[in-house]
Image (tube, grey):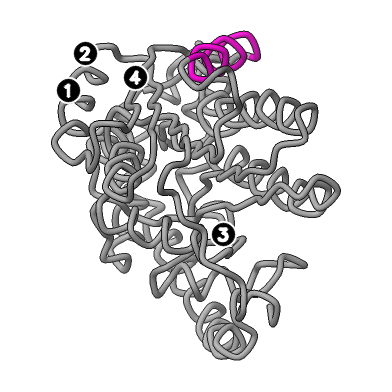
């Protein structure tokens, strides 16, 4: 921590930054900020139409005609997709690795655990863990092989710290990506590669509307205490954390309380400030947990009616789902 007080802030100007999920939401917001700061930016997404629209937005904020701004359509949930995407992204830069990789692709489809199927469980793990893990694996191999320093930025969520009804399929992937980042932060000290991971809460992006389409009512009620932020607002906090050298990045009130209280052996961002956040969590989180548990128990009757109306009790289909 003390070393960071005198460390020079990371400057993306002139650097090649690779942003997955860069066609919309948080990914696009981060990509625009990086372009504004003078970076060369490559964005990747599956949706070619959204990529075209995103590129128009990036062009409006470029600061120099020399900036290289590119988009690519790839599915990153497989090792092959991640490798091919990086091959394409590196090509305009003399095949050099990106200086920073922001892995912001993914999606969330919350529902009750007994509504999940084999397909939805696998999809959620793909969209929370593998969509980042394969890119991180391929990129880190290249960085180590070429002895190039760089930054790898993972993306988790509040659910990477806490558990909440409705996120039984989504939460494990978010916690797993945190475990991967925690491990690599230490392991990559061997190579001088910086690891960061962000933990956003509610973000008002296009993905949020999709998320709410399957989200249980009880989950929506519990989340009323989170005021939420826009993708643009969170992108500023995320990039500020990366530039400052923070490992766990949670730039809002609730995120800081969760981070300071549950970071385990992860480095502190600021010992004295985090001690205050930790004290607030020590006092407040048990009260919050008891309140949430009480809310869930009070939802039993409505939940029983919900399952009955959905035909759960009369269904012989073992893969019952919404």
Residue bearing mark 1:
53
Queried whether the magenta region covers residue 85, the answer comes back as yes
The picture places residue 263, in percent across and down from the top left corner, at: 67, 67
The structure residue drawn at horizontal position 46% and vertical position 37%, both measured from the top left corner, is: 17
Residue bearing mark 3:
162
Which type of secondary structure does the marked residue at label 4 adopt?
A: strand
The structure residue drawn at horizontal position 35% and vertical position 31%, both measured from the top left corner, is: 22
Q: CA distance from mark 4 to mark 2?
A: 11 Å
Which type of secondary structure does the marked residue at label 3 adopt?
A: loop
Neighbor class of circle 3 (other Cα within 10 Å; few <14, some 14-19, many 20+) is few
Q: CA distance from mark 1 to mark 3?
A: 35 Å
The structure residue drawn at horizontal position 77% and vertical position 67%, both measured from the top left corner, is: 265
Q: Quadrant of residue 144?
A: top right
Q: Mark 1 vs mark 4: which is more N-terminal?
A: 1
Q: CA distance from mark 2 to mark 3?
A: 35 Å
Residue bearing mark 4:
71
By secondary structure, the bulk of the magenta-drawn segment is best described as helix
**As rendered, which of 224 and 130 lies closer to the eye?**
130
**As rendered, which of 81 and 140 lies closer to the eye?**
140
Q: Which residues are magenta?
A: 79-91
The structure residue drawn at horizontal position 53% and vertical position 78%, both measured from the top left corner, is: 285
Which type of secondary structure does the marked residue at label 1 adopt?
A: helix
Which type of secondary structure does the marked residue at label 2 adopt?
A: helix
Q: CA distance from mark 2 to mark 1?
A: 7 Å
Q: CA distance from mark 1 to mark 4?
A: 10 Å
Residue bearing mark 2:
49
- Discs 4/2, front: 4
Q: Mark 3 vs mark 4: which is more N-terminal?
A: 4
């Amino acid at each position: 921590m003390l070393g960071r007080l005198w460390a020079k802030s990371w400057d993306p100007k002139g650097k090649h930054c690779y942003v997955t999920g860069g066609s919309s939401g948080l990914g696009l917001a981060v990509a625009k900020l990086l372009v504004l700061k003078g970076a060369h930016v490559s964005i990747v997404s599956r949706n070619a139409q959204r990529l075209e629209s995103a590129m128009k937005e990036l062009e409006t904020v470029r600061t120099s005609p020399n900036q290289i701004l590119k988009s690519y359509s790839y599915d990153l949930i497989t090792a092959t997709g991640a490798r091919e995407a990086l091959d394409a992204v590196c090509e305009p830069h003399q095949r050099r690795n990106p200086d920073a990789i922001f892995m912001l692709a993914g999606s969330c489809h919350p529902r009750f655990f007994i509504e999940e199927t084999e397909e939805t469980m696998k999809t959620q793990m793909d969209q929370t863990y593998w969509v980042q893990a394969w890119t991180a694996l391929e990129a880190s191999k290249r960085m180590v092989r070429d002895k190039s320093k760089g930054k790898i930025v993972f993306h988790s969520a509040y659910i990477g710290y806490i558990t909440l009804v409705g996120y039984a399929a989504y939460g494990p992937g978010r916690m797993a990506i945190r475990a991967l980042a925690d491990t690599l932060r230490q392991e990559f000290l061997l190579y001088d590669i910086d690891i960061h991971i962000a933990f956003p809460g509610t973000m008002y992006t296009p993905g949020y509307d999709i998320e709410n389409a399957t989200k249980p009512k009880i989950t929506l009620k519990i989340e009323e205490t989170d005021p939420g932020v826009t993708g643009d607002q969170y992108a500023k906090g995320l990039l500020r954390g990366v530039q400052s050298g923070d490992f766990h990045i949670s730039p809002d009130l609730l995120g800081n309380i969760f981070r300071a209280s549950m970071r385990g052996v992860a480095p502190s961002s600021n010992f004295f400030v985090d001690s205050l956040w930790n004290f607030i969590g020590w006092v407040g989180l048990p009260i919050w947990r008891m309140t949430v548990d009480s809310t869930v128990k009070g939802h039993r009757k409505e939940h029983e009616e919900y399952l009955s109306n959905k035909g759960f009790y009369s269904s012989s289909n073992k893969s019952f789902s919404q």
